[in-house]
Image (tube, grey):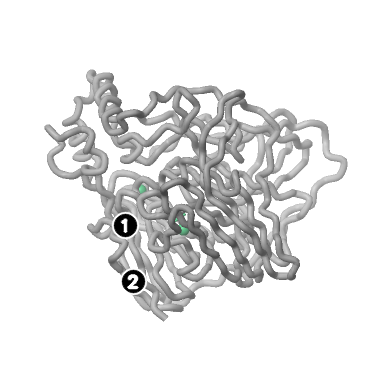
Amino acid sequence: MHRRTFITSLASLAVAGPAAAQMNHDMSTMNHSAQSNAPATSLLDLPEGQPLRELPRLANQSVTPGLFKASITAGPMNARLIEGVGTPMLGYNGGNPVIEVTEGDRVELDFTNDIPEEPTTIHWHGMPVPADQDGNPMDAVAPGGGRSYVFDLPPGSAAPYWFHPHPHEFTAEQVYRGLAGVFLVKPKADPIPAAYGDTVLLLTDIRLAADGTIAPNTSVDLMNGRIGDHVLTNGQKNPKIEVRVGERRRFRLINATNARFLRLAFENARMTVIGTDGGLLEAPVAADEILLTPGERVEIVAAFDSPGPATLTTLEYDRGWMGPGKPDESRLALLTASIAGDLAEPMPDLPRELRTIPAFANPAVTRRFVLSEEMGGGMEGMDHSSMPAAGMKFLINGASFDMNRIDTVSKVGQVELWEIVNDADMDHPFHIHGTQFQVIERELGGIVSQAPHPAWKDTVNVVPGETVRILLRQDLPGARMYHCHILEHEKLGMMGIVDVQA
Ligand code: C2O
Ligand code: CU
Ligand code: CU
């Protein structure tokens, strides 16, 4: 449906324009009836400017070369975001760990679900793992239960991946309550100078109620995706690093928020993109700004050439907000580098060539996936409390997700052209499990633009009215999900299953 009609349906709840305040009031009344005992949210201050913490590494319990073995438990943890206030959250082994392995390694993880009364899974976002090890909603682990996840990471799979829960109906909540981790697959030989370091920046988004607990979702969240009040970098608000003039640093940025579009700039630093979701580019590309949508990763090298602080910050981005309550998404500082005296020795330059990305063969089939939004019938007179779940639908090819339905049948090893068509009014970051794809071209308003350079991707943003054409191949059999990575849209149906047959 088109944005105008969508807003019109909302306007039947409350009138826009001079009555905007009234509309906000109505929306909040609606939220309260939807979440009857929800505490009111308030903008609690989080401490800023503390030294950047490294995320904990998951220790390898194996001594066998080429084998990574560890235990991982999803369960409650108590976070200390504010002095003296505990925030009940969910964590993996009590936090957001980094699993670091080398391509070619075998991984064996012993998983336990300690989340009270909720099923969960671990999904290895972007990773080439077998379908039955990929934490699909069909493979839920019951509360108190466990399973092992076992997979081999083939040569060429080095990339900054991440992992998160994917149980049917609970993914969005479990992610905003804190469940996410980083999965770094390192290459055998890394072309990026070691002198740049390797800093992971896991970006999450949190909204706290006045008592410091995580506030539940509102109907505005269900429609637009949940936007928190604070973007956190490795669990901290605007942490600080120290660098020297002339220093270059490698950063791996992961957008693990439910729904926040991060249009990023690095004030007083020069950014060079060196990699995307599926690993390094063929050659470095200078960038003034980067749009990192939910689920995506980017690797950059930041050059700090002049004195004074440098700030990684967000810029305004219009992703098609529906209804009231659009948060201010600009000027959020995610990381501040304080730049002290000169470097003793100049840093090595980036190599001109990082790797080769082979082109796909011609596609054997073309498939079309049309993303649309629907506001269920007659909002007028509808019980407000039933409105969010009953009213909104996010569809692919006109269908809402059904765990027991195969939407697409494909073949192992077959090159396919997928056309992702956004026939909706919001941006939708489209994600496919089990493989990496290449964006070939984008078409908007009759104008086709080729991708500027090849890159491995597993999530691509599609703006309203746009068609994005991608090439992909699934090398492993089984059922794979594809969906919008705004997790509230995934929850409300914008997901399908492709069965890849051997
Ligand atoms: Cu990161 Cu199906 O998701
Ligand atoms: Cu995924
Ligand atoms: Cu979406």
* Residue 324, horizontal then vertical, whole percent: 31, 29
**Mark 2 is on which residue type?**
Thr
Q: Which residue is mark 1?
A: 421
Q: Quadrant of residue 259?
A: top left
- Pointer 1 and pointer 2: residues touching (CB < 8 Å)? no
Helix, strand or loop at disc 1?
strand
| Residue 226 visible (yes or no) | yes
Left or right: 468 with respect to 237? left
352 in relation to 413, above or below: above
Helix, strand or loop at disc 2?
strand
**Residue nearest the viewer, comparing 450 with 383:** 383
**Which disc, if any, is residue 464?**
none
* Residue 190, horizontal then vertical, whole percent: 72, 62
272 in relation to 218, above or below: below
* Residue 8, horizontal then vertical, whole percent: 19, 35
Q: Residues within 10 Å of mark 2 (few under 14, many from 20)?
A: few
24 in relation to 227, above or below: above
Residue at image position (26%, 51%) is 372
Which residue extends farthest bottom? Answer: 502
**Residue nearest the viewer, comparing 183 with 439:** 183
Q: Which residue is mark 2?
A: 366
| Residue 435 visible (yes or no) | no
Which residue extends farthest front? Answer: 144
Left or right: 64 with respect to 39? right
**Residue nearest the viewer, comparing 333 with 86:** 86
